[in-house]
């Protein structure tokens, strides 16, 4: 599926186009502290998030008639998140998130496996995927149809001109 012969680009949110570290606490092992995340999840805190340099890349791709922009995030998106994205002119053609997951067992999946399930529709399509999580990057780099971009490196290149 080529979505009208447009190139498919997929963007993660947190750590890729949005810096939300002020409200996403980690456990000692580095995994997300889910209770802390939900405790910090408020409209006020969401609007304290800032944009990373790849946000501008996403904007430019959306404005171009060459790309179909997909957001694929492990977040549950609510109206506050959508308002934040709209406020910052971060538009997309499609969003894949916890509330619209195609399978209900998704809560038990690791982030890379969850995203694999969400992006299943594109498994035979070439696409570019921007993500910051090392396990996701490592898994998707093994897929021959995916051009995996490490958002940590990309944001550093855009931010520091490296």
Image (spheres, rainbow, N blue to C red):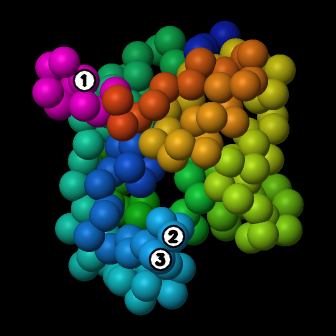
* Label 3 to label 1: alpha-carbon separation: 29 Å
Q: What stretch is highlighted in magenta?
A: 154-162
Judged left or right of residue 104, residue 128 is: left
Which residue is drawn at the image coordinates 31% and 64% (left, top)? Answer: 21
Residue linked to disc 1: 157
Q: In which quarter of the image is the C terminus?
A: top left
User: Is 62 located above or below residue 45 in the figure?
Assistant: above
Considering depth in this image, is 71 or 30 the residue closer to the camera? 30
Q: In which quarter of the image is the N terminus?
A: top right
Which SS does the magenta portion mostly show?
helix
Q: What element carries label 2?
A: loop
Please name which of the two marks, 3 or 1, marks the residue nearer to the observer: 3
Residue 45 image-quadrant placement = bottom left
**Label 2 with label 1: CB-CB less than 8 Å:** no
Picture mark count: 3
Q: What element carries label 3?
A: loop
Judged left or right of residue 84, residue 146 is: right
* Label 2 to label 1: alpha-carbon separation: 28 Å
Residue linked to disc 2: 29
Considering depth in this image, is 143 or 99 the residue closer to the camera? 143
Q: Residues within 10 Å of mark 3 (few under 14, many from 20)?
A: few
Residue 55 image-quadrant placement = top left
* Label 3 to label 2: alpha-carbon separation: 5 Å
Q: Position of residue 9 (x, y in %)?
A: 55, 26
Residue linked to disc 3: 27
**Label 3 with label 2: CB-CB less than 8 Å:** yes
Q: Position of residue 85 (x, y in %)?
A: 36, 53
* Residue 41 part of the magenta-drawn span: no
User: Is 135 located above or below residue 27 in the figure?
Assistant: above
Q: Where is residue 135 in the image (x, y as percent from the top left)?
A: 61, 45
Which residue is drawn at the image coordinates 43% and 85% (left, top)? Answer: 36
Q: Can residue 103 be seen in this view?
A: yes
């Amino acid at each position: 599926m080529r979505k009208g012969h447009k190139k498919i680009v997929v963007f993660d949110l947190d750590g890729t186009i949005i810096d939300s570290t002020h409200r996403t606490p980690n456990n000692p092992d580095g995994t997300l502290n889910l209770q802390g995340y939900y405790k910090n999840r408020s409209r006020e805190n969401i609007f304290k998030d800032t944009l990373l340099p790849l946000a501008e890349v996403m904007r430019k791709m959306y404005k171009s008639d060459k790309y179909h922009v997909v957001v694929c995030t492990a977040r549950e998106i609510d109206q506050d998140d959508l308002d934040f994205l709209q406020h910052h002119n971060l538009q997309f053609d499609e969003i894949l998130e916890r509330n619209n997951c195609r399978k209900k067992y998704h809560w038990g999946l690791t982030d890379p496996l969850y995203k694999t399930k969400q992006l299943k529709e594109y498994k035979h399509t070439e696409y570019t995927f921007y993500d910051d999580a090392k396990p996701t990057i490592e898994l998707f780099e093994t897929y021959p149809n995916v051009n995996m971009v490490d958002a940590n490196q990309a944001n550093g290149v855009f931010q520091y001109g490296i």
